[in-house]
Image (cartoon, rainbow, N blue to C red):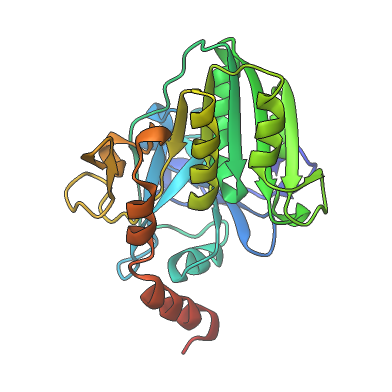
Amino acid sequence: MIVHPDGSRCRLADATPKKLHSVILAKKQISDTITEMEVYAPLVAASALPGQFVVVCQNEKAERIPLTISDIFPQRGSVSIIFQAVGRSTIELSRMNAGEEIMSVAGPMGQPSVIERFGRVAVIGGGVGTAIAYPVARALKASGNHVTVIVGARNKDLFILTDELRGFADELVLITDDGSSGKKGFVTDALRELLEKTAFQRVLCIGPLPMMKAVSDLTKQYSIPTVASLDPIMIDGTGMCGGCRVTVGGEARYTCVDGPEFDAHLVDWDELKKRKAFYFEEEKRQRDIALTGQ
């Protein structure tokens, strides 16, 4: 039985870990669209670091999807992944339950976050991006930084990991678009208010592309080093296909092997926006198939 900080419980699958391969050990439905799973992946759990991710393939006919490692449990040989059911693959994955087997959980992928003693750091998570922000913010705090965490969501039901963040953050600011919890507005509103009275040595932003670009534009005015964790279209996750190519400082970089974190002030945000939207119509069609079966 896994007991979460909010008191909820998830039953471990009735199976012997030594006989398992990428089995879902526990599942928690955080909201209608956000799911947390603890997945048995001992090789990943043994070496994963904050900021890295896994590539999950549900079955032989499914696509490969990159998902954030939100927590690591080396003693159990497992990792936690938190994802939002927004496309066909994530919708189908969210329908799986404890005890079921995922064909492949490959990782850890990508470069880990740079964890140093910077001083005063702001970590900004938007929506499910908070799942990435959480382990990085925790590691930054453990390295002696003063950590301010700003979490933004459309409404209160989409907040995740707030109790866990309160456990170590020096300051936690909650922002909702509709004002249903915390302050009403956007993460940039809270960040601007902080920047007017506090000096930060580093900012990390993780979330929707428009949010990260807005944070980058704001911190550039204050000359604060800023890192963004990017999520472009990704296929193999090993640098072979080039699907996750982004332009940083005028040079082509591959998010899966060079990132996912890059200097936010050097990212070509307009190009990234166009590349992410390239398969919009096909993604919408596949989502409709997942929801309706037609």
Q: Position of residue 33 (x, y in %)?
A: 63, 63
Q: Tell me: 41 left or right of 178.
A: left
Q: Residue furthest left?
A: 240
Look at 66% across and 30% down and name the residue there: 149
- In which image quadrant can residue 243 be found? bottom left
- Can residue 160 be spotted in the picture? no
Q: Residue furthest bottom?
A: 294
Q: Tell me: 61 left or right of 130.
A: left
Q: Residue furthest front?
A: 221
Residue 165 lies, with reference to residue 142, above or below; the image says below
Q: Position of residue 209 (x, y in %)?
A: 48, 50
Look at 39% across and 62% down and name the residue there: 58
- In which image quadrant can residue 41 be found? top left
Residue 17 lies, with reference to residue 224, above or below; the image says below
Q: Which of 162/203 is in front?
A: 203
In this rendering, the count of numbered labels is 0
Look at 44% across and 58% down and name the residue there: 101
Q: Which of 252/250 is in front?
A: 250
Q: Position of residue 88 (x, y in %)?
A: 45, 71
Residue 59 lies, with reference to residue 187, above or below; the image says below
Image quarter hosting the N terminus: top right
Q: Which of 181/272 is in front?
A: 272
- Can residue 282 be spotted in the picture? yes
Q: Tell me: 67 left or right of 121.
A: left
Q: Position of residue 119 (x, y in %)?
A: 57, 11
Q: Which of 266/74 is in front?
A: 266
